[in-house]
Image: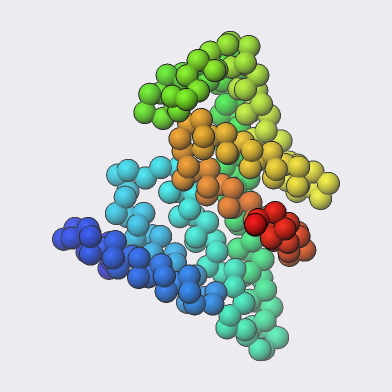
Amino acid sequence: MAPSFVANENVDVFFAIALVFLVISLLLKPSYITTSLFFWLVFNLYIVYLPFVSGADYIFFMLALWCVPMVTRPMFKSETGSTIQKACYNSGVILCKLQIVFIYLVSGWDKLNSEVWRSGQAFDYITHLGNMFNPMFSGVFDNPLLQLILSWITILFELAFVVLIWFRKTKIPMLIMGVLFHLFIWIVLSLPDFAAVMIVSYIIFLTDTEITGLRNLLKRSLP
């Protein structure tokens, strides 16, 4: 926790130290040391921002923790060591997935049990959040029927994600819907940190083949 204590004396020095640790952890090849270093950095940032942490900060903190065992360096050569290493890796992957699914489960279930969300009034409240709602969309979501539709789309997506993300045929469509869902949140509610963390976290649901295909698609799409 040492870097976080530096913030009490000089916050600029703290951020300089945090930036150095971040660069080091990103430049070095993934290993138990680098992932632990990255989590330590995230933990210190979390401590410093504790009075002001958002949902995105908490999600990032937890995902950084589950990523610690998701490496294969150094490779254990003994059969027992290799088995334990694979078990730790798989546990990290499962915990990351469950963390994301749990977020949608809790959020969707709370909305389903909220009369404000079931009636569509929640979107009416959102449009009046002056510090968050993008003024470019002023008046766009004032229609009560549209608010009702958007509320139920949100509820159904979050609850459907919990189930359909585990099946091969429905996984990709759910991830695409999720990206669009969070881009909507990013643009309309001006919450880029939460949207970015959730979109990036979707990578954990992709297989190596799917990631390679996505990388090739991006290469062909970008100039």
Q: Which of 214/41 is in front?
A: 214
Q: Is residue 64 visible?
A: yes
- Compared to 195, does 16 lie above or below? below
Which image quadrant for residue 143?
Answer: top right
For the view shown, which residue lies furthest in the bottom direction? 77
Numbered-mark total: 0
Colour pattern of the rendering: rainbow
Q: Position of residue 209 (x, y in %)?
A: 77, 63
Front residue of 136/102: it is 136
In this view, the residue farthest toward the front is 223
Quadrant containing the N terminus is: bottom left
User: How far from the left and from the top, in percent, is residue 102?
Assistant: 60, 44
Q: What residue sits 60% from the left and 57% below the top?
A: 95
Quadrant of res 149: top right
Instruction: Name the residue: 45% across, 48% down.
Output: 58
What residue is drawn where x is 63% and y is 51%?
A: 202
Q: Residue furthest left?
A: 9
With 51 as the anchor, is 188 left or right in this view? right
Q: Is residue 143 left or right of residue 39?
A: right
In the displayed structure, 152 sits above or below 85; it is above
Q: Nearer the viewer, residue 222 or 43?
A: 222
Percent position of residue 103, x then y: 57, 42
Is the C terminus in the top left, top right, bottom left or bottom right quadrant? Answer: bottom right
Q: Residue furthest right?
A: 169
Residue 211 visible here: no
Direction from residue 170 to residue 144 in the image, left or right: left
Whole-percent x and y of residue 115? 56, 16
Residue at 80%, 48% in the rendered image: 167
